[in-house]
Image (cartoon, rainbow, N blue to C red):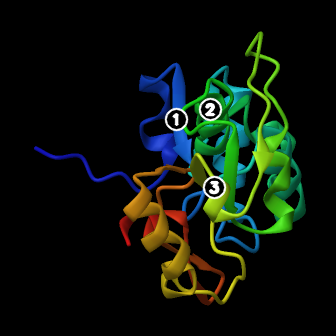
Amino acid sequence: MTQIVNALSDISAQYDALFVDLWGCVHNGVRAFDAANKALIEYRAGGGIVVLVTNSPRPRAQVEQQLADFGVARDAWDSIASSGDSARSALFLGAVGQKIYFIGTDAELPFFEPLKLIDDPIQTEHVPIEEAEGIVCTGLPTADGTPDDVRAPLLYAKQKGLKLLCANPDIIVDRGEKREWCAGAVAQA
């Protein structure tokens, strides 16, 4: 028979580690969920390991700061795995070339800081779409933007056969009470 789980504590003793999605589970894009915060702190106090998993295009350090801003306690988790860091690895290994057309916000520019894990990262340069070897998309240029806002450069890129590196596969997210398009919607367009 299927067990109905009402709280993490109902099943936590069965697991040495938890991989926990951030958005919608630990926070709502604006603030932490108090019950989730408390449950993860208690789980770790009992010896469990918590790895937070996120589709955020941001590097780990930015995710950590965002969690602090939302009120997620530092003792609620052990490590973070972000799609942003995975995409950065691909970028600095040359997945989309050196001349990059960037779709995203200035707040996401830390994405382009090389990872210490890669010994000899390629040097990247932001260029207009006409000079690009590839595209990096961390999201839309504005919070209220839509995929249609970047249709022209995407059509050009498609004609030229440019690769697109999508740093956040989410299509949409709810940030508190507001719905926003993500990089996944651009990649899908």
Query: Which residue position is annotated with label 2?
Result: 51
Q: Are marks 2 and 3 in contact (CB under 8 Å)?
A: no
Q: Which mark is residue 88?
A: none
Of labels 2 and 1, earlier in sequence is 1
Label 3, on which residue? 36
SS at circle 3:
helix
- Which percent across, then down, holds residue 59? 76, 42
One can see residue 138 in this view: no
Q: Amino acid at mark 3?
A: Ala
Kindly check if marks 2 and 1 are in contact, taking CB atoms under 8 A apart as contact: yes
Q: Residues within 10 Å of mark 3 (few under 14, many from 20)?
A: some
Q: Which residue is mark 1?
A: 19
Q: Earlier in the sequence, mark 1 or mark 3?
A: 1
Q: Residue at x 62, y 62 (%)?
A: 130
Of label 2 and label 3, which has the lower sequence position? 3
Q: Up-down: is 181 above or below 76?
A: below
Question: Which residue is rendered at x = 46% and y = 24% of the image?
Answer: 15
Mark 1–mark 3 Cα distance, whole angstroms, equals 13 Å
* Residue 185 falls left or right of residue 53: left
Cα separation, mark 2 vs mark 3, equals 14 Å
- Secondary structure of the residue carrying tag 1 is strand
At label 1, counting other C-alpha atoms closer than 10 Å, the crowd grade (few under 14, some 14-19, many 20 or more) is some
